[in-house]
Image: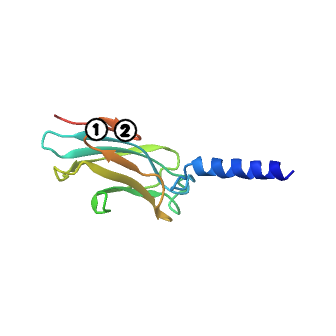
C-alpha cells in the first residue's frame, strides 16, 4: 500500500512539473487577442488587424480597447472600441498609420474590457518573421 501511495505521489509530482501553467485566465470574462495580422505600408507605417474575443454583455461589460506596446510596456498605439459586440464574436478591428521605431522588432498586442482591464491572452508579434503563434506579418522587403 505504501509503495502504491509513493508511486502515485511521484507520478503526480512529475506530471505537475511537466504541465505548463497558463499565465492568462481562459475565461471569456477577460478580453483575449486571438490573432494579429500586421501589414507594413509603403510609408513604413503599419496596419494591425486584430481579432478579439470577449463575453460582451452590453454596455455593462464589454471589450473596450486593444493596444500595442513594446516589451517594456510602453503604449505605442491604442484602438478604443466604440460599442459592445454581443452578437459578433470574435470580431476583428484594424488600426492603421502606426509609426513604429525601425529598430523595434517585437510588440505585444493586448485587449481589455471595461470591467477587468487588461489581463488575458495577448499576442507577441515578431515583425522580423512572416508568422508565429497567433500572428502573421506582411513586410515590403
Query: Which residue sits furthest right?
Result: 1
Name the spot of residue 67 as percent of width and height, x first: 34, 56
The residue lying toward the viewer, choosing from 122 and 49, is 122
Numbered tag placed on residue 57 in the rendering: none
The residue lying toward the viewer, choosing from 28 and 101, is 101
The type of colouring in the image is rainbow
Q: Is residue 82 visible?
A: no
Query: Which residue sits furthest left?
Result: 43
The residue lying toward the viewer, choosing from 67 and 19, is 19
Residue in the picture at 84% in, 53% down: 2
**According to the image, label 2 marks what residue?**
132
Name the spot of residue 96 as percent of width and height, x first: 24, 47
Mark 2 crowd level (few <14, some 14–19, many ≥20, 10 Å Cα): some
* Label 1, label 2: how far apart the Cα atoms are: 7 Å
Does residue 109 appear left or right of residue 87 in this picture?
left
Name the spot of residue 73 as percent of width and height, x first: 32, 62
For the residues bearing labels 1 and 2, Cβ distance under 8 angstroms: yes
Mark 1 crowd level (few <14, some 14–19, many ≥20, 10 Å Cα): some
Does residue 15 appear left or right of residue 93 in this picture?
right
Disc tally is 2
Image quarter (top left, top right, bottom left or bottom right) of the C terminus: top left
The residue lying toward the viewer, choosing from 53 and 123, is 123
Numbered tag placed on residue 129 in the rendering: 1
Residue in the picture at 15% in, 44% down: 44
Amino acid at each position: 500500500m505504501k509503495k502504491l501511495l509513493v508511486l502515485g505521489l511521484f507520478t503526480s509530482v512529475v506530471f505537475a512539473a511537466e504541465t505548463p501553467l497558463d499565465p492568462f485566465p481562459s475565461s471569456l470574462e477577460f478580453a483575449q487577442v486571438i490573432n494579429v495580422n500586421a501589414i507594413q505600408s509603403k510609408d513604413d507605417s503599419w496596419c494591425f488587424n486584430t481579432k478579439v474575443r470577449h463575453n460582451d454583455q452590453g454596455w455593462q461589460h464589454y471589450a473596450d480597447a486593444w493596444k500595442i506596446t513594446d516589451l517594456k510596456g510602453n503604449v505605442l498605439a491604442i484602438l478604443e472600441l466604440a460599442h459592445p459586440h454581443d452578437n459578433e464574436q470574435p470580431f476583428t478591428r484594424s488600426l492603421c498609420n502606426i509609426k513604429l521605431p525601425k529598430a523595434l522588432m517585437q510588440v505585444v498586442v493586448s485587449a481589455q474590457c471595461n470591467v477587468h482591464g487588461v489581463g488575458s491572452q495577448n499576442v507577441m508579434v515578431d515583425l522580423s518573421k512572416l508568422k508565429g503563434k497567433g500572428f502573421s506579418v506582411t513586410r515590403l522587403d
